[in-house]
């Protein structure tokens, strides 16, 4: 099985291993807080009038202690997606699937990590969530979800929280407000949320993820990007189109990727450019610095521009965009860097 280790370094990989042979005594490792379980799709979890990405049958959840990173250190979330194997020794679910971990905070649901499994392979995905610690508190309920659709157990999920003693640089998080976590089924749709920025914080910014997906095998919206517009109090502050074109580098992570075009026998499905994601890799969050978020109340809005796909009223919607966003900020007075006076 191939794993995408992401932002964590060699020392962190060693801290998660089962053990190593060495003549020297192993260095102490930080405690790891984890949950794990198996997910399966249940048809009764899907309403008849809409396409649901995540439902009760797709999730595992547990309430975990949240470790506090040391000064200058980081808090990381590690998501392992492990395919269930059938009698033939191959994964029951050979498709690429979205996987995520969401925290249930008093201020709303907060996405910690999003990743896409490979075709016929799981993965290890790591995300720095240091900036999100003010919303997590000392103990928090986490939900891990993976949307597979065969009507039997398909994936095992494992979530781990671990700290590193350096790497946060000058970040000193003090404010974290979830904005939205939802699936946008059609373009020309707006999502708005009010936030109140406290006094004495620095570097307000939005951390967001947006990936386009297909519901019925059409191009909407897995292979067609849309313009995203971010506004603060009605003023446009950012405009972008999510896109990834590095799928050709991930063939080792996609052992079951088929050939979508008979005229191009060397082309695999995992090679294709996509709307903000690549099979087998972490979905990279976009960070938008927003000095417009001065102390006080504000309204933050996301609008997707573009034409809605043509659909028959008797058919499900052809595509959707998975959206999440959060506003974060740091303490105004920074803690001194380790080793300085």
Image (spheres, helix red, strand yellow):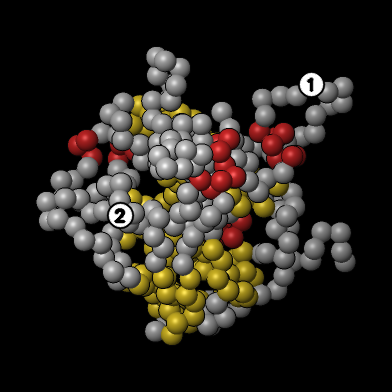
Residue 54 position, x and y percent, is 33, 45
Q: Does any portion of residue 271 appear in the rendered image?
A: yes
- Number of dots carrying numbers: 2
Res. 168 image quadrant: bottom right
- Residue, x 71% and y 24% (percent of image)? 19
Within 10 Å of disc 2 (Cα), the crowding (few <14, some 14-19, many 20+) is: many
Mark 1 in CB contact with mark 2 (< 8 angstroms): no
Q: Secondary structure at mark 2?
A: strand
- Nearer the viewer's eye, disc 1 or disc 2? 2
Residue at mark 1 to residue at mark 2: CA–CA distance: 49 Å
Pointer 2 residue: 319
Q: Is residue 47 left or right of residue 70?
A: left
Q: Quadrant of the N terminus?
A: top right
Judge whether 60 appears above or below 326 on screen: above
- Upstream in sequence: badge 1 or badge 2: 1
Front residue of 312/200: it is 312
């Amino acid at each position: 099985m191939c794993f995408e280790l992401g932002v964590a370094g060699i020392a962190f990989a060693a801290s998660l291993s089962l053990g190593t042979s060495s003549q020297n005594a192993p260095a102490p490792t930080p405690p790891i807080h984890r949950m794990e379980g198996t997910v399966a799709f249940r048809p009764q979890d899907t309403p008849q009038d809409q396409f649901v990405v995540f439902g009760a049958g797709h999730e595992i959840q547990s309430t975990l202690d949240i470790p506090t990173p040391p000064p200058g250190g980081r808090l990381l979330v590690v998501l392992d997606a492990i395919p269930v194997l059938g009698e033939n020794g191959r994964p029951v679910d050979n498709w690429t699937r979205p996987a995520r971990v969401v925290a249930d905070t008093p201020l709303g649901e907060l996405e910690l990590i999003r990743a896409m499994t490979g075709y016929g392979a799981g993965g290890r995905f790591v995300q720095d969530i240091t900036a999100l610690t003010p919303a997590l508190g000392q103990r928090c309920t986490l939900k891990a979800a993976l949307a597979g659709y065969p009507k039997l157990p398909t994936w095992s999920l494992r979530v781990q929280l671990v700290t590193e003693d350096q790497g946060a640089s000058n970040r000193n998080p003090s404010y974290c407000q979830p904005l939205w976590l939802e699936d946008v089924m059609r373009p020309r749709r707006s999502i708005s949320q009010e936030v109140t920025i406290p006094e004495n914080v620095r570097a307000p910014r939005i951390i967001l993820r947006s990936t386009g997906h297909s519901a019925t095998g059409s191009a909407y919206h897995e292979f067609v990007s849309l313009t995203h517009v971010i506004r603060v109090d009605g003023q446009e502050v950012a405009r972008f189109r999510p896109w990834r074109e590095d799928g050709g580098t991930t063939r080792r992570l996609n052992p079951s990727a088929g050939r979508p075009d008979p005229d191009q026998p060397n082309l695999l499905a995992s090679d294709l450019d996509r709307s903000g994601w690549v099979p087998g890799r972490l979905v990279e969050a976009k960070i938008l610095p927003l000095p417009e978020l001065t102390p006080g109340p504000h309204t933050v809005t996301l609008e997707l521009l573009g034409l809605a796909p043509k659909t028959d009223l008797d058919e499900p919607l052809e595509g959707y965009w998975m959206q999440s966003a959060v506003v974060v900020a740091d303490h105004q007075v920074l803690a001194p860097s380790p080793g300085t006076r």
